[in-house]
């Protein structure tokens, strides 16, 4: 089975059920054109009476717009009563099709969904073939509003009892998007307020700086921001009420107090490290308690045989040889005196920790020791004193541990703190909502001041006074170009080329082999300037091919429309739109007559040259 | 219908009707009292008010036709025998058989030419316009243009200037041709980026950008004398205010529109026309009137055409079941599932 219904079958089915005239919305221009090709050899021909009616109606339109007399689709329109209608066609062709449709001569029009808003003709039936449309390069699902806009074309008032919206699937269609779209409530719309440079200049021309905030406050954007702010304020009130029971306690701001207390408590090490810390006096002795050293104990004295650490003991341990040949263990803390006398001692790794002969000798020497021995002076350095943990100390600064409301604070803190955080967040967002437009305006003002369109007191400079008349996209780039005198000496065709590249914002590929040297060097200059302005304004595409196309149209008055179309792969409708947009841009330059007479004259000349052929015949 | 109106209307209905309305909307609706039921209904339908209104209307009509056929008897509570039958004929009726193709196709044709009678909303909009600004939000093809034409005619009879703006040059041109035919070519002028004709005519058609520029020039002292006589500004397709690139132009135009001129905003169905009206009320000297309705002049039916040429209704019901996107016709459902199975790469499922 084919992935979607064949156009010929579609029209046959619609005719069979009396569902014509119909508008068939397809994904792309190409799909529309391919549908037309499919009718080339179809035998769906209309009865001669209707063919003639179409022919006469077409003749009438062609008399008005001769440019469509040679249109390749005319035979199909006449023979079968179907047509394509999309942005790739000339406006005159679209007008002709709309006129035929209004008079009821056609059975089906194949159109693109992108154009649904611009299609101003109804039919009995609309055929929907997809659930998404191409929006700046990727496909997005149709919104409910868009589905209803499309379906709204069905059913002509006074000509139909009922209208029909027929869905026919194509690959990747999502039926639920369409059923939701047909049965749902359209989405709410949101303001898309942006602050552009000409807007700033025009506002400041007419109103003093201090009034602007009031004017911005009148925008739908601010209205909607206020709505959101009010919603937040209501939430804030609710939070206030919820925070009521958590009012002042022993300390006024107990939440903050508890929070820092809690923080400190949490960041204190969970338990003291169990490192064996000896007091400084003991620590200072340790290096001297080596095997062979004579030390004084509670009762009598002994000779150190070894020093060791034991798992169960906090302090280092000593193994001592006591008088009478006894070997005992004792902690270093039980050492009373360290005497200034040592004996040689040969250590071994097992009991009794010294060689047998050493043991015997030491036992003898121990017996022979005098009662008084000189004491070794050991200095404990004060720096070795252990500093108490800083955090532990600050924990003592808090009254909390002993406070009477401690348990209440501990219990309420999580709730209260969450509420208060929310409160802070809402307060901040409300403030942002109330002032964001004004901040955006100020940012623009700052940029215009650095470029010298505004004085430091936000008054228009001489440059600002004319720059405000350029009220189109990329106005900053255009005014900067004028100030950089990029257009000085530029002839009308060059000017047209540059304006066309500025005006064209479509990246559909086109092709044009040649570009004049003057235009290419000027375009390079424009690109450089556009790049330097990127922090302040999005750069235009600045396509060289469309610039060259517009330049040729102005530079060669003998060039025909057909000839122009042959120079590029762009669709007729796109070329027309390009030139129409260029005309708009040039008309803006024309308004600078008072300050830039040469430029305005050049633009006026370009305008007269550009308006010929198809561009003249059309409204 | 605003929320308050709807709430009042619901409160006037008997509980039995509310229960029927709540079926499928509110869980365990029979447990709730009337107040609570209304609350739950409104809460549930906050995303789909139209569906609720539609069903309510259908129920009311049904009840009315019953009371007409049943005579006075229906004033009394229905007899017990009826009580058992009522729940079996619910509103948006699942047990009700799906519509057949022939039934769906019935009624195609051209209506008898009838003398044009303006719809109530059109008259309402026109009479409101004599005092205040008006926002109209109605479905495509309901006759917004009639209001525009009539309003323009009245303003011109008062010797006021009228400005009509549209977002697209092509639409401006179409309207220019149409209005010239209606009012006479000397009465209508057009100003677009690349075309200027009859600039002194009392009815001026322009793109919204041009009007914005005119208003800026007037504000900065280069006064266009004609702004003083400006009586009416019509902004067609004003849902463009949400256009990503150009929406700001509509806002600027409305902010700087002279206060003595009335504003008429024509828009397709949008979700929040009340917001637009409230906004206008907050910045314009008089309170703005909102005229909206969601009923189409020519009723719409939806169908499904399978690639093999088989046509079936898309929904179970004849019309569009507003608020019930899942009430698909079983045949359409079957065919579409078949289609999905065939077109999707094997082993992959959409859901």
Image (cartoon, grey):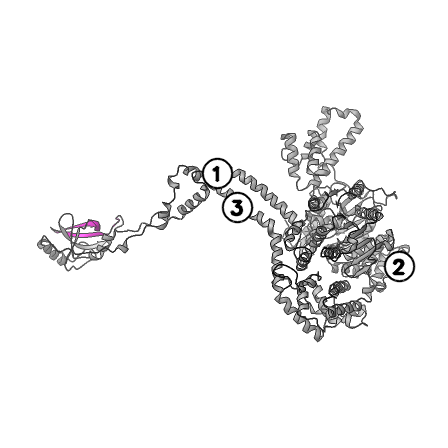
Characterize the local packing of mark 1: few (<14), some (14-19) or many (20 or more) Cα atoms within 10 angstroms.
few
Callout in the foreground (1, 2): 1
* Residue A397 image point, x, y percent: 37, 45
Of the numbered discs 1 and 3, the one sitting upstream in the chain is 1
Of the numbered discs 1 and 2, the one sitting upstream in the chain is 2
A599 and B275: which is toward the camera: A599
Callout in the foreground (3, 2): 3
Residue B85 in which image quadrant: top right
- Does the stretch in magenta take in B93? no
Instruction: Give yes or no for contact between labels 3 and 2 (Cβ–Cβ under 8 Å).
Output: no
Q: Chain of mark 1?
A: A
In the drawing, what numbered circle is on residue A424?
3
Q: Chain of mark 2?
A: A
Do we see residue B157 in this rendering? yes
Q: CA gap, disc 1 to disc 2?
A: 83 Å
In the rendered structure, the answer to whether residue A435 lies left or right of residue B61 reads left
Do we see residue A167 in this rendering? no
Characterize the local packing of mark 3: few (<14), some (14-19) or many (20 or more) Cα atoms within 10 angstroms.
few
In the rendered structure, the answer to whether residue A527 lies left or right of residue A420 reads right
Which residue is labeled 2 in the image? A60
Q: Do marks 3 and 2 both belong to one polypeptide chain?
A: yes
Q: Which residues are magenta?
A: A309-335
Which residue is labeled 1 in the image? A247
B18 and B251: which is toward the camera: B251
* Residue A430 image point, x, y percent: 58, 47
């Amino acid at each position: 089975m084919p992935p979607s219904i064949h156009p010929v079958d579609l029209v046959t089915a619609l005719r069979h059920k009396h569902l014509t005239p119909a508008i068939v919305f397809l994904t792309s221009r190409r799909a529309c054109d391919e549908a037309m090709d499919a009718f080339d050899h179809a035998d769906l021909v209309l009865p001669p009476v209707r063919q003639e009616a179409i022919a006469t109606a077409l003749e009438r339109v062609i008399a008005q717009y001769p440019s469509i007399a040679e249109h390749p689709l005319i035979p199909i329109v006449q023979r079968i009563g179907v047509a394509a209608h999309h942005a790739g066609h000339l406006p005159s062709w679209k007008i002709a099709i709309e006129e035929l449709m209004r008079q009821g001569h056609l059975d089906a029009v194949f159109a693109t969904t992108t154009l649904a808003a611009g299609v101003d003709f109804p039919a009995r039936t609309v055929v929907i073939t997809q659930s998404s449309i191409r929006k700046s390069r990727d496909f997005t699902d149709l919104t409910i509003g868009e589905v209803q806009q499309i379906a709204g074309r069905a059913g002509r008032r006074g000509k139909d009892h009922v209208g029909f919206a027929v869905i026919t699937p194509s690959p990747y269609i999502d039926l639920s998007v369409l059923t939701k779209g047909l049965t749902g409530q359209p989405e709410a719309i949101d303001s898309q307020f942006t602050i552009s440079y000409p807007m700033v200049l025009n506002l400041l021309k007419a109103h003093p700086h201090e009034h602007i905030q009031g004017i911005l406050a009148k925008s739908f954007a601010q209205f909607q921001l206020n709505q959101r702010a009010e919603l937040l304020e209501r939430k804030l009130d609710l939070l206030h009420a919820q925070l009521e029971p958590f009012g002042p306690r022993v300390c006024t701001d107990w939440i903050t107090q508890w929070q820092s207390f809690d923080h400190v408590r949490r960041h204190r090490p969970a338990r003291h490290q169990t490192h064996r810390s000896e007091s400084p006096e003991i620590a200072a002795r340790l290096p001297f308690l080596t095997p062979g050293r004579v030390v004084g104990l509670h009762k009598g004295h002994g000779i150190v045989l070894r020093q060791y650490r034991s798992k169960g003991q906090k302090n280092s341990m000593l193994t001592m040889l006591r008088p009478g040949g006894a070997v005992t263990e004792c902690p270093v803390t039980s050492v009373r005196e360290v005497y200034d006398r040592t004996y040689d001692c040969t250590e071994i790794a097992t009991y009794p920790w010294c060689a047998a002969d050493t043991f015997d000798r030491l036992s003898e020497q121990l017996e022979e020791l005098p009662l008084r021995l000189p004491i070794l002076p050991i200095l404990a350095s004060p720096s070795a004193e252990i500093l108490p943990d800083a955090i532990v100390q600050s924990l003592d600064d808090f009254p909390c541990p002993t406070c009477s409301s401690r348990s209440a604070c501990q219990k309420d803190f999580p709730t209260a703190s969450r509420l208060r955080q929310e409160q802070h967040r809402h307060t901040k967002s409300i403030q942002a909502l109330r002032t964001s437009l004004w901040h955006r305006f100020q940012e623009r003002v700052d940029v215009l001041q650095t470029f010298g369109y505004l004085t430091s007191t936000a008054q228009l400079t001489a440059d600002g006074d004319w720059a405000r008349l350029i009220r189109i996209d990329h106005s900053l780039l255009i005014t900067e170009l004028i100030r950089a005198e990029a257009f000085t000496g530029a002839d009308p065709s060059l000017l047209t080329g540059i304006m066309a590249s500025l005006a064209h914002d479509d990246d559909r590929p086109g092709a044009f082999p040649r570009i004049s040297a003057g235009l290419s060097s000027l375009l390079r200059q424009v690109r450089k300037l556009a790049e330097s302005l990127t922090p302040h304004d999005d750069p235009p595409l600045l396509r060289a091919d469309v610039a060259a196309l517009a330049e040729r149209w102005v530079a060669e008055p003998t060039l025909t429309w057909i000839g122009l179309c042959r120079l590029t792969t762009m669709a007729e409708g796109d070329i027309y739109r390009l030139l129409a947009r260029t005309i708009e841009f040039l008309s803006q330059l024309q308004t600078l007559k008072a300050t830039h007479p040469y430029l305005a004259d050049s633009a006026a000349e370009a305008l007269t040259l550009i308006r010929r052929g198809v561009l003249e015949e059309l409204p | 219908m605003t929320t308050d109106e709807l709430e009042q209307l619901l409160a006037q209905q008997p509980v039995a009707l509310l229960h029927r309305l709540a079926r499928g909307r509110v869980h365990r609706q029979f447990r709730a009292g009337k107040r609570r039921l209304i609350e739950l209904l409104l809460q549930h339908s906050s995303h789909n008010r139209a569906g609720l209104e539609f069903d309510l209307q259908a129920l009311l009509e049904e009840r009315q036709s019953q009371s007409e056929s049943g005579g006075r008897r229906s004033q009394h509570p229905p007899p017990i025998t009826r009580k058992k039958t009522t729940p079996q004929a619910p509103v948006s009726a699942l047990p009700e058989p799906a519509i057949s193709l022939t039934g769906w196709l019935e009624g195609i044709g051209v209506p008898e030419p009838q003398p044009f009678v303006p719809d109530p909303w059109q008259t309402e909009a026109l009479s409101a316009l004599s005092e205040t600004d008006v926002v109209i939000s109605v479905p495509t093809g309901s006759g917004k243009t009639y209001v525009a034409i009539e309003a323009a005619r009245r303003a011109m009879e008062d010797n006021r200037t009228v400005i009509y703006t549209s977002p697209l040059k092509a639409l401006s041109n179409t309207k220019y041709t149409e209005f010239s035919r209606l009012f006479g070519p000397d009465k209508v002028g057009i100003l677009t980026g690349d075309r200027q004709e009859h600039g002194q005519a009392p009815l001026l058609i322009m793109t919204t950008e041009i009007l914005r520029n005119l208003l800026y020039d007037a504000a900065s002292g280069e006064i266009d004398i004609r702004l003083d006589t400006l009586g009416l500004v019509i902004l067609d397709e004003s849902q463009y205010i949400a256009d990503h690139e150009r929406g700001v132009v509509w806002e600027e135009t409305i902010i700087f529109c002279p206060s003595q001129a009335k504003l008429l905003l024509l828009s397709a169905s949008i979700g929040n026309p009340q917001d637009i009206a409230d906004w206008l009320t907050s910045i314009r000297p008089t309170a703005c009137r909102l005229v909206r309705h969601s009923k189409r002049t020519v009723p719409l039916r939806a169908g499904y055409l399978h690639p093999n040429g088989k046509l079936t209704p898309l929904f179970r019901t004849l019309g569009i079941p507003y608020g019930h996107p899942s009430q698909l016709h079983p045949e359409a459902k079957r065919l579409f599932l078949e289609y999905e199975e065939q077109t999707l790469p094997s082993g992959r499922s959409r859901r």
